[in-house]
Image: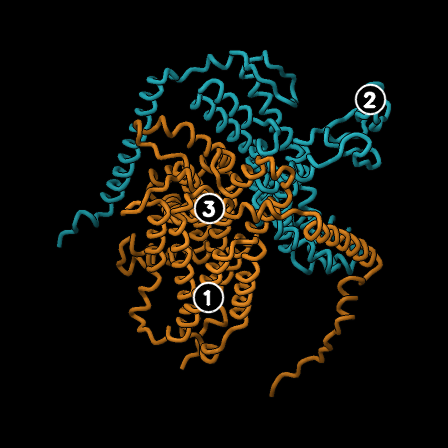
Chain colours: A orange, B cyan
Amino acid sequence: MAPVSPVMVRPGPWQRLRRELFASRVDGLISIGLIGGLVAVGLGLAKWVLVQAQWTVISANSTLFAVGRYPLEQQWRLWLLTTLLALATGLSWGLLRALPRSGASARAWPRNDRWAVAILVVLALWRPMALQLALPIQLRWWAITGLLLLARWAAGRWGAAIPASARRWMPLIWPLLYLLGMVLISGGLGLVRVAPSDWGGLLLTLLMATFSILLCFPLGVLLALGRRSNLPLLRWGSVLYIEFVRGAPLITLLFLGQNILGFLLPGGLAPDRVWRAAWVLTFFAAAYVAEAVRSGLAAIPAGQLEAARSLGLPMPQALIHVVLPQALRVALPATVGQFISLLQDTTLLSLIGLLDLLGTARTVMANPAYLGRNAEVYLVLAVLFWCCCAALGLGSRALETRLNPTAPSNVTPSR
Amino acid sequence: MVTPWWRHRRLMPWLIQAAVGLVVLVLVAFLLGNLVRNLTQAGLLLTWSWLGNPAGFEIAETAIPFDAAMPYWRALLAGLANTLKVVLAGLVGATVLGTLVGTASFSTNGLLRRLARVYVELIRNIPLLLQLVFWYFVVFLALPNGAAALQLPGVVLAKAGLYLSWFDPAWQWQGPQLINGVWTAPLRITVEFAALLTGLVIYTGAFIAEVVRGGVASVAKGQWEAANSLGFSPLQTLTRIVLPQALRVIVPGLNSQYISLAKSSSLAVACGYTDLYSVAETTLNQTGRAVEVVVILLGSYLVIDLVISGLMNGLNGLVQLRER
């Protein structure tokens, strides 16, 4: 017999509103005050955005904000890279969706997917027009978005037909694409070299962030393992490094990188200013990632390592195959949190004279033509950073549920 | 069967450590050797005597008396005092704001609860440096001067600074006054300091709100219900029953947020406030003493971190549950 559930009366919207906002007299007063404040702020902001703000400072400098002073005749390389990235994104997206998942929902077009497509289309249609880009550039953005959606559709349609052995190698296109992107951006292999000092804007910000994120992660894992190692030298070395870096503000370390690195290396060997900053960011973030990973390692019972060792696995294999997969899953939210703050920390490059997004913004506003247009520029940057960081956070939460072996959606019913 | 040497349980750990130690030693020796050689070539070998030379630059606002004729060490000390000033004010402000917002996310009022979430999500996903320049250039530098200044009871917000009521030298309570188009008041805060403080408080406040929220959420629901049934008001429940228990979880989290606030205060240079980092940068540009300046910088922040950590650990010992 099915258990009898208590009668549930779903409160109507009016009752819900009343319970949420006007439960007591004090609540009512607070609510009225807050609503009044919110309406005033909202109206003021809307008036400013639509009437008072002068957005030409953004539209006239959109290229500068996007790529800085990257030479105009070489910008086709960045377009090519964007196209390739869009293709790879579409393919991965489609394949992830096409992977056989639990039963019936495999074929359906999930709602969040539809939302993503809708947002993408709206962004692609609206953004180039809002920025008043030239028609050829608008057309390029539309073509790239179309390509992304096409690749997603094709991969979703025929992705399941690809044999699993081939599909296992598909993720490799990302590291390959990254290396190719580096070559495309910096030149070499027959392409004209573009000096790092000419990279700027969003390009520099994203490049610095991805470079540091990719490199600080393995470094951080090694440091965390070192800190929990039984070997005293490794342990104390790691502790010393982690605590030294965590005790110093990033800006002083960047300062150290710009002013002392030249003395530490033999003449001429020191990398240029952009790469120095990139390495400092990497080594800085590694210490914080190490702490995140260490908390993950601490959550894994010692029995796991002992069991693996007593089954005859050598230490490196026991760590790689047994301990780390579990520990990294636990450490995932904290690690992504560090990546998010690393992305935010790239703004500090503007303080040491590099032209990242914020640095570019400062040079634009130094132009007398755009005097007093601070609010517009900073608002756009804030929205941009907010979207990137929020997307990273959302992605980490999605990955978390996907990796969690006990989550209900991932438990396949036994046949 | 003979165990191969790479499986030897005693030998291998020592071999690994010896190898790592050797690599680190060689690396450090290599870097230090270069450092000494390069510094000797540049004529900048480590010395501290330059600290006694007159600094020759002014600092706009100082917590301790300073002028350009004073030596470099005095300039650095003035910078450190400025840093400490903003860190102390920031700690207090961020704690108050964070506690308010963190407890607001447990309000019975749905709107207040959601606003607290929106605040945290909005602030945490925007870089601090961007927020600092926003507060300085967009908000505080846009304030009008003179009679048009923003006037609140006892407080005047003008581009030239924030003017507050305080006791004048004759111990009379004195509000801001407009004399010949210029505001005067017993207490004046520069807009640079105000912008930095606002940015730091609002940014760190969001993180502290999360710490407080986590701490309050860790207190069992039965505690709320028990206090409620004993006749405590919601506010009394929070301040007398829940927060004292939540402190055990909150204090360690606060520790790391306080340290990160102290470190973030080094971004002061973005809104024109002359803190330790800013003075150090000027000093380096004038003297070229890179190594010494960086050592002073890193050392000072390390000491500040250690002091905060020590105090918070002491506090932690006080709030932990004492078991018999």
Residue at the image point whose x is 55% and y is 21% from the top = B76
Dot 2: element:
loop
Name the residue type under label 3: Val
Residue at the image point whose x is 67% and y is 47% from the top = A53
In the displayed orientation, state which residue is furthest to the front. A135
In this rendering, position of residue A46 left or right of residue A334 = right
Give the labeled residue for mark 3. Answer: A67
Name the residue type under label 1: Gly
Q: Are marks 3 and 2 in contact (CB under 8 Å)?
A: no
Circle 1 crowding by C-alpha within 10 Å: few under 14, some 14–19, many from 20: some
The subunit carrying tag 1 is: A
Number of marks present in the image shown: 3
Dot 3: element:
helix
Give the labeled residue for mark 2. Answer: B168
Dot 1: element:
helix
Among the two numbered marks 3 and 1 on one chain, the one whose residue lies closer to the N terminus: 3
Query: Relative to residue B119, is residue B306 depicted above or below?
Result: above
Q: Position of residue B73 (x, y in %)?
A: 54, 17
Q: CA distance from mark 2 to mark 1?
A: 70 Å
Q: CA distance from mark 3 to mark 1?
A: 23 Å
Q: Nearer the viewer, mark 3 or mark 2?
A: 3
| Of the pair B199 and A326, the residue shown nearer to us | B199
Name the residue type under label 2: Asp
Query: Relative to residue A155, is residue A370 depicted above or below?
Result: above
**The C terminus of chain A: image quadrant:** bottom left
